[in-house]
Image: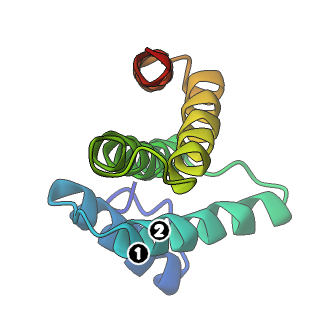
């Protein structure tokens, strides 16, 4: 999409290139993942505000970033449940992971993360 010249705004080009590079070698730092997701989301919102559909590749990049956030939350839940099962943050993280997995499932017709979150939820109940 960048090589095809579909993106004219130079700042948006930088944001998209940075997100794509990030996804090639993602960080496990949630703050970094969140920042990448937020900035790319702003680019997509900019398209929506102009009444123009964002290139589908942007949606794909955004879904990958949301998936990273979801996986991070799932990993937190698993680790924290082993170390401190009474931590109230476990349930909050599980709710966020479920929301992100549902969004990805509905938008991209892919239930992989949704099934993983449901399985994690079930394992916590046992």
Residue plotted at (58% across, 43% down): 91
Q: Are marks 1 and 2 in contact (CB under 8 Å)?
A: yes
Q: Quadrant of the C terminus?
A: top left
Q: Quadrant of the N terminus?
A: bottom left
For mark 1, give the secondary structure.
helix
Q: Is residue 124 above or below residue 48?
A: above
Q: Is residue 118 above or below residue 12?
A: above
Tell me if 17 is positioned left or right of 85 in this view: left
| Percent position of residue 74, x then y | 39, 41
For mark 2, give the secondary structure.
helix
Q: Is residue 125 above or below residue 73?
A: above
In which quarter of the view is residue 44 placed? bottom right
**Residue corresponding to mark 1:** 31
Can I make out residue 8 in this image?
Answer: yes
| Percent position of residue 45, x then y | 72, 63
Residue plotted at (48% across, 15% down): 122
Determine the residue located farthest toward the bottom in the rendered image.
Answer: 11
């Amino acid at each position: 999409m960048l090589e095809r010249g579909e993106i004219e705004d130079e700042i948006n080009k930088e944001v998209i290139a940075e997100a794509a590079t990030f996804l090639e070698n993602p960080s496990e730092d949630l703050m970094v993942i969140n920042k990448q997701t937020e900035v790319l989301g702003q680019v997509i919102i900019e398209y929506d505000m102009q009444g123009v559909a964002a290139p589908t590749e942007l949606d794909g990049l955004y879904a990958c970033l949301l998936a990273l956030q979801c996986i991070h939350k799932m990993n937190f839940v698993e680790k924290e449940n082993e170390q401190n099962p009474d931590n109230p943050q476990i349930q909050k993280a599980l709710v966020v992971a479920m929301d992100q997995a549902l969004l990805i499932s509905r938008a991209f017709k892919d239930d992989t993360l949704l099934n993983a979150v449901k399985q994690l939820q079930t394992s916590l109940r046992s």
